[in-house]
Amino acid sequence: MTQRNEIPSGSPPKNRQVMLIYYSFSGQTGVLLNRLSAGLKDQGVEVFYEKLKPVKHLRFPVGSILRTYLMMFATLLRRRVPIQELSDKCKQEYDLIILAGPTWSYNPSGPVLSFLDRDGREVLGGREVLPLISCRGYWKVHWWGLQKKLEKCGALFSNLIAFSHPNPEPWCTIGVFLKIAGKNPERSGFIGKYYNHFGHSNEQMEEAYSFGVQIAESLKNKTPLSAINFKTDLALP
Ligand SMILES: Cc1cc2nc3c(=O)[nH]c(=O)nc-3n(C[C@H](O)[C@H](O)[C@H](O)COP(=O)(O)O)c2cc1C
């Protein structure tokens, strides 16, 4: 019987295949993944996408300061956000699954928590998984909790990609909070002097592209993903 990813003799070499399972609320994980997948594809890797879709659409921005506080409180309590059924793509075998999403109050986001609870064991169990976190700046507690959940699902993982917003504090926290509420901190006279861009920078997007290239090379050469340094000054300024 042919093992997972083993090429039967006589067959043409098979392209490496990577599945990106992700959730993105304000688009930042999405843009990082776009560039990372471009890096993978440019090296001949086939990329598949599974976007986690909440049953009830979550609107970004949430629309008010009060709603933002309520969302922060709910996410602090790790409230799950129910998601729709996954597509059949998730039942196939891949050389690597990248599980990506934002940090919400020091935790994985509600849709990713729902995915891990409901589908984690079936989709990630026994498979090589590389998590990707997009955050404002505090990814370590998220990563600690996520590792426990991945272990429970039986996922195999040896590295992590985390990108934090490059803005200095406290302006980054204030800016992200106002942005979620639906304000325009970049255009506000006072805050705008210190906060002029929401989310990840163009340089970080190019770093994501370079990570995609390195992951592809690691898959092709069968070197461990743990050997790649993703904790660069650009990803985590
Ligand atoms: C409800 C909520 C809570 C958040 N909590 C944190 C947090 O605890 N730490 C952090 O670094 N960023 C936090 N953020 C910021 C996001 O992680 C960050 O903006 C990320 O880039 C968003 O990714 P996305 O656009 O893919 O959703 C929070 C965002 C939201 C909406």
Image (spheres, grey):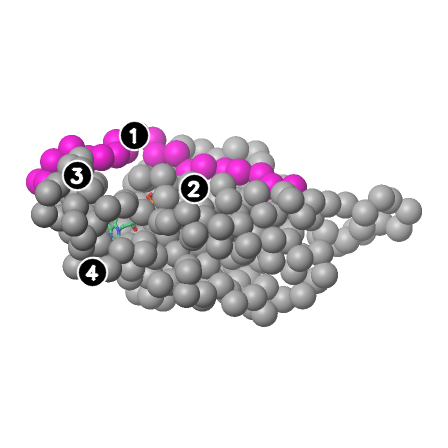
Task: Tell me whether circle 1 and circle 2 mark residues in contact (CB < 8 Å).
Answer: no
Q: Secondary structure at mark 2?
A: helix
Q: Secondary structure at mark 3?
A: helix
Tell me the kind of residue under disc 4: Glu
- Residue 82 placement, left or right of 177: right
Residue wearing tag 4: 169
Question: Within 10 Å of the Cα at label 2, are there few (<14), some (14-19), or many (20+) other Cα atoms?
Answer: some
Mark 2 vs 3, N-terminal side: 2
Q: Residues within 10 Å of mark 1 (few under 14, many from 20)?
A: few
Which numbered disc covers residue 31? 2
Work out which residue is located at the far right of the displayed protein and give it: 10
Q: Earlier in the sequence, mark 1 or mark 3?
A: 1
Discs 1/3, front: 3
Q: Which residue is mark 3?
A: 187
Sooner in the amino-acid sequence: mark 4 or mark 2:
2
Q: Which mark sits nearer the N-terminus, 4 or 1?
A: 1
Q: Amino acid at mark 1?
A: Lys
